[in-house]
Image: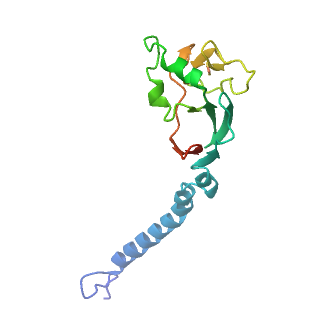
Amino acid sequence: MTSLIDNGPHGENRRDFLHIATGTLAATALAATAWPLIDSMNPSADILSQASVEIDLSSLEPGQRITAKWRGQPIFIDRRTQATIQAVRSESLADLKDLETDEARAINPEYLVVIGVCTHLGCIPLGQAANARRGNWGGWFCPCHGSHYDQSGRIRKGPAPKNLKVPPYILSGDSQLIIG
Ligand code: FES
């Protein structure tokens, strides 16, 4: 009588072959299904193009502020006057909620660069326009729940727990700002 299981020269049989063939097909199908998902996790060309932004600050006057955009977030750039730098650097640090010196926050004291997102619940603070409300310390004021930031972007009053974040950046030459 013929056996239903044909053993090959090394002891393999049809059942083994079917298991291997089924496993290979399943692995191929899984790879085909997973690829679009894995591929979609790579940053798009659009996102990559925003990984860093370059801003020419040469036309910015002392005392002027501008807003740039980096990775979808507003970036506040303040070209501070000498009087502002002196005032902010001579303040007592004793009452700071989030202790940071201005020296640690501004690579070049003339240019303060911070992410313009309130560290309480993410509103955009006022203060970029010359006539905007800037709070009790002359920096920025968040109208959502009343947080006051000083001219170094440090939280001084209100519910925000942290200073405005400083993004990664370099200043190239006198006035070329590269964020990211
Ligand atoms: S979001 Fe700015 S104070 Fe609440």
Q: Quadrant of residue 63?
A: top right
Q: Quadrant of residue 77?
A: top right
Q: Is residue 13 left or right of residue 120?
A: left
The x, y position of residue 121, in whole percent, is: 59, 24
Between 46 and 113, the residue placed more toward the observer is: 113
Residue 171 visible from this viewpoint = yes
Q: Classify the position of ligand 1 by quadrant: top left, top right, bottom left or bottom right.
A: top right
Identify the image quadrant of the C terminus: top right
What residue appears at the point 55 percent right and 60 percent down from the top-left corner?
39
Q: Is residue 93 left or right of residue 119?
A: left
Numbered label tally: 0
What residue appears at the point 46 percent right and 11 percent down from the top-left corner?
95
Q: Is residue 128 above or below residue 155?
A: below
Between 165 and 11, the residue placed more toward the observer is: 165
Q: Residue furthest left?
A: 10
Q: Is residue 157 above or below residue 10?
A: above
Q: Is residue 144 left or right of residue 92?
A: right
The x, y position of residue 152, in whole percent, is: 54, 24
Q: Residue furthest right?
A: 131
Identify the image quadrant of the N terminus: bottom left
The x, y position of residue 16, in whole percent, is: 33, 76
What residue appears at the point 24 percent right and 82 percent down from the top-left corner?
11
